[in-house]
Amino acid sequence: MEENSLNVYGEQLRSCSINPLTGFFRDGCCNTSFEDTGVHTVCIQVTQRFLEYSKAVGNDLSTPMPQYNFKGLRPGDHWCLCAGRWVEAYQAGAAPKIFLEATHEETLAIIPLNLLEKFKA
């Protein structure tokens, strides 16, 4: 984890998940950079409703893909989600809860803090 990464409260970014290993950089944190065009900055708690929604819109996160060392997500897992995808899930009524201390501050460019706080895990 980058020591200077901050969460939505301006505090040091906390780890989101090591098992499953998450993050754009697979460092367990929702870190981001200019290379992360998907903005994988929102630390969520996976729900069955969200997995079904994500699969329906073409991003199957529940099926294992061993070639990518991906075991598939299950309800209860923590995962760094793309901020835009969270907004889409929110608009569809399938938004998962969020761990704000592990959600990168860059998320605030896409989702306002007051909305994030309504989904605090």
Image (cartoon, rainbow, N blue to C red):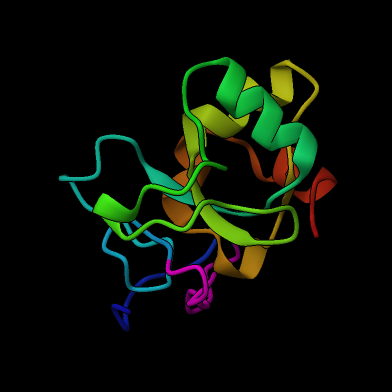
The residue depicted at 79 percent of the width and 55 percent of the height is 120
Q: Give the farthest residue toward the bottom.
A: 3
Q: Horizontally, is 114 left or right of 66 in the view? A: right
Residue 106, horizontal then vertical, whole percent: 42, 49
The residue depicted at 57 percent of the width and 43 percent of the height is 62
**Relative to 55, is 39 above or below?**
below
Residue 57, horizontal then vertical, whole percent: 54, 15
Question: Quadrant of residue 91 in the image?
Answer: top right
Q: Is 43 a magenta residue? A: no
Q: Horizontally, is 88 left or right of 63 in the view? A: right
Q: Give the farthest residue toward the left.
A: 35
The residue depicted at 58 percent of the width and 35 percent of the height is 111
Closer to the camera, 60 or 5? 60
Which SS type dominates the magenta stretch? loop
Per the rendered image, the range of residues in magenta is: 9-21
Closer to the camera, 48 or 28? 48
Q: Is 15 a magenta residue? A: yes
Closer to the camera, 15 or 46? 46
Q: Horizontally, is 9 left or right of 18 in the view? A: right
The residue depicted at 50 percent of the width and 32 percent of the height is 60
Q: Horizontally, is 76 left or right of 56 in the view? A: right
**Relative to 2, is 9 above or below?**
above
Residue 107, horizontal then vertical, whole percent: 49, 45
